[in-house]
């Protein structure tokens, strides 16, 4: 399968990493359908508002979106790339992909509620797992996202992705967990146990959270097929939990 893969932003035929070039790409407007419009008075009208249950997608997004950040990594002679991350500690520690910030000469982190970006400091990385921990010095505690269980997440479960595809900040997409345990080789990186999801992810989504309906992280969005629709991949949160203590120790 590796012959048609890229990670989100770094070329490798067929798939792309989720870190995209800053500035975005072309946008295509959807055209309204040309079919006849029913004017039947018998059709019931929808209520102006619907109740939001604790586990609805909109409620999850409202609760966790403030913890999702945009990352712009600058590289001399290469330009800038956009990625995503999320806070897991209120003191300013956040997770993202290693490929988002690898070899960066400057890391800008855009946090909800602040007009200017913060400078991201690398606390620790795990290149093999494609994970990185950053820290920003925030003047007050930030919103965080709780980590769930990828092992307890069944195939077919709802999945919500929040990220910055093509620099479109805080874009929300929804799908399901399509498969588990996918092995992929993308460029020089080999992944042994990815979650596959139908939630749309694109360059700029890398490092962002894949969430369940409880608003818990079940994976970190990492790669997408460029030859198909609804074929994205995320690092399972079990791998994140395993790598996190050593990354934090390296930054202590």
Image: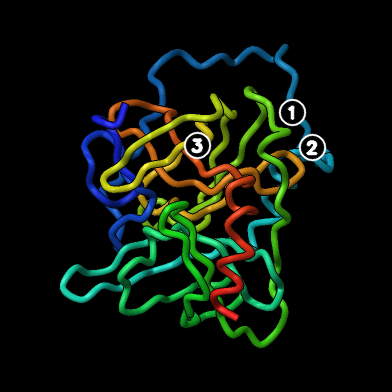
Instruction: Please report contact status of discs 2 and 1: CB closer than 8 Å, yes or no.
Output: yes
Circles 3 and 2, Cβ within 8 Å, touching? The answer is no
What is the distance, in whole Å, between disc 2 and disc 1 at their CAs? 9 Å
- The image shows residue 207, relative to residue 172, as above or below, that is below
Number of other residues with Cα within 10 Å of mark 2, as a class: few under 14, some 14 to 19, many 20 or more: few
Q: Number of marks in the image?
A: 3
Q: Secondary structure at mark 2?
A: loop
User: Visible in this render: residue 146?
Assistant: yes
Secondary element at image label 1: loop
Q: Nearer the viewer, residue 190 or 56?
A: 190
- The percent coordinates of residue 188 (x first, y second) are 28, 48
The N terminus, quarter of image: top left
CA gap, disc 3 to disc 1? 40 Å
The answer, for residue 112, to whether it is visible in the render is: no
What residue does disc 3 label? 194
- Scheme of image coloration: rainbow
**Residue where numbered disc 2 is placed:** 50
| Residue at mark 1 | 46
Label 3 element class: strand
Disc ID at residue 237? none
């Amino acid at each position: 399968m590796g012959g048609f893969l890229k990670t989100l932003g770094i070329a490798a035929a067929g798939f792309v990493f989720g870190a995209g070039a800053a500035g975005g790409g072309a946008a295509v407007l959807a055209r309204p359908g040309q079919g006849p419009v029913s004017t039947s008075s018998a059709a019931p009208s929808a209520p102006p508002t619907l109740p939001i249950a604790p586990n609805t997608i909109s409620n999850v997004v409202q609760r966790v979106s403030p913890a999702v950040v945009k990352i712009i990594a600058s590289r001399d002679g290469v330009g800038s790339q956009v990625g995503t991350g999320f806070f897991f500690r209120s003191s300013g520690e956040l997770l993202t992909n290693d490929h988002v910030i690898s070899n960066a000469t400057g890391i800008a982190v855009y946090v909800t509620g602040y007009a200017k970006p913060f400078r991201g400091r690398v606390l620790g990385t795990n290149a093999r797992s494609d994970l990185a921990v950053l820290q920003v010095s925030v003047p007050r505690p930030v919103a965080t996202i709780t980590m769930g269980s990828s092992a307890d997440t069944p195939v077919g479960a709802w999945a919500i992705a929040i990220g910055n595809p093509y620099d479109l900040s805080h874009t929300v997409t929804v799908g399901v967990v399509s498969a588990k345990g996918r092995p992929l080789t993308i460029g020089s990186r080999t992944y042994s146990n990815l979650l596959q999801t139908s939630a749309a992810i694109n360059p700029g989504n890398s490092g962002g959270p894949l969430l369940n309906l409880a608003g818990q992280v079940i994976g970190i969005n990492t790669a997408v097929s460029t030859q198909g629709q609804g074929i994205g991949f995320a690092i399972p949160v079990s791998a994140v939990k395993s790598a996190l203590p050593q990354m934090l120790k390296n930054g202590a």
